[in-house]
């Protein structure tokens, strides 16, 4: 019955990739009853999950009205509801934030992306004010390149945002992760060493996220 949403109106920051890996990890490694709500207009997470050998339950819900009405009903059917948020659509993101227990913002370490994260934080603060508390919120660095100055600067900047928790785990840019969606797989299905490293990063990230609930 917990609702965890991946949100950020900035496209390409890793919402879908994280939502699919998180749902898979919860279902297979934690044996949790999971449902993924696909609010992304391209329906990329539902297509990805449908191609898997043992598919994770998922449902496409896209309009702000449907998200507001259906998320609580769908949450009753599972232990963890993971929402893959849309790019661009402020009203749909707002609807999700009115229902989520926890909002997670993946942020790429670039100037444009850091500015868009502050937009996401603004929507979160509005939802928290209307709801008198929830949703809890956290941010993590997504698709970061090891050893770059941008990554260090982004960590310093995001750590100064008091409204959201900065998660310690960084998900690095890896070809192994980029390869997963095309194969309807996750990094845990791929045999390479980089895939194994990314699997460990995701596992650390997801444990940090669960600890916030
Ligand atoms: N850590 C990573 N390393 C390499 N590639 C990545 C990583 N995370 C995501 N990608 C790739 O980046 C692209 C965008 O990722 P994804 O679709 O998850 O972002 P999104 O936030 O859902 O985008 P949108 O807002 O358009 O829905 C995809 O091609 C994906 O394979
Ligand atoms: Mg997406």
Image: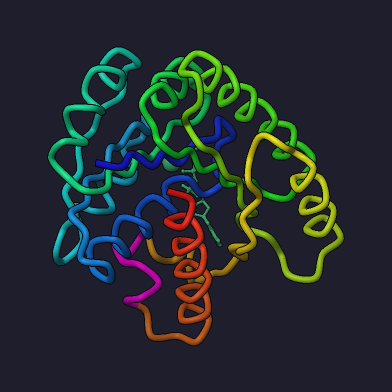
Q: Quadrant of residue 74?
A: top left
Locate residue 158, reporting x and y percent: 75, 45
Seen at 60% across and 23% down, the residue is 125
Q: Quadrant of the N terminus?
A: top left
Locate residue 44, reporting x and y percent: 34, 43
Seen at 36% across and 35% down, the residue is 42
Locate residue 53, reporting x and y percent: 15, 66
User: Of all residues shown, which one is farthest toward the front?
Assistant: 132
Q: Tell me which segment is drawn in magenta.
A: 181-189
Left or right, residue 20 beside residue 131? left
Within the magenta stretch, is there residue 210? no
Along the line of sight, the residue nearer the viewer: 171 or 76 = 76
Q: Quadrant of residue 149?
A: bottom right
Left or right, residue 211 beside residue 106? left
Magenta region's main secondary structure?
helix
Depicted 113 relative to depicted 73: above or below: below
Along the line of sight, the residue nearer the viewer: 59 or 212 = 212
Image quadrant, ligand 2: top left
Seen at 37% across and 33% down, the residue is 40
Check the image and tell me how it is coloured. rainbow
């Amino acid at each position: 019955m917990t609702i965890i949403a991946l949100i950020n109106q900035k496209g390409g920051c890793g919402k879908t990739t994280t939502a699919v890996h998180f749902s898979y990890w919860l279902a297979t490694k934690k044996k949790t009853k999971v449902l993924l709500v696909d609010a992304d207009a391209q329906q990329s997470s539902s297509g990805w999950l449908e191609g898997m050998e043992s598919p994770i339950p998922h449902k496409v819900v896209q309009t702000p009205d449907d998200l507001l009405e259906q998320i609580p009903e769908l949450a009753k059917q599972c232990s963890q509801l993971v929402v893959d948020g849309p790019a661009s659509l402020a009203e749909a993101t707002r609807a999700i934030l009115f229902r989520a227990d926890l909002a997670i913002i993946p942020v790429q370490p670039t100037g444009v992306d850091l500015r868009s994260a502050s937009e996401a934080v603004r929507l979160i603060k509005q939802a928290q004010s209307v709801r008198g508390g929830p949703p809890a919120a956290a941010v993590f660095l997504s698709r970061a390149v090891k050893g770059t100055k941008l990554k260090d600067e982004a960590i310093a900047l995001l750590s100064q945002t008091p409204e959201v928790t900065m998660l310690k785990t960084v998900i690095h840019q890896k070809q192994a992760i980029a390869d997963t969606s095309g194969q309807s797989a996750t990094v845990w299905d791929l045999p390479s060493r980089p895939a194994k490293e990314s699997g460990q990063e995701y596992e650390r990230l997801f444990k940090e996220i669960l600890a916030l609930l």
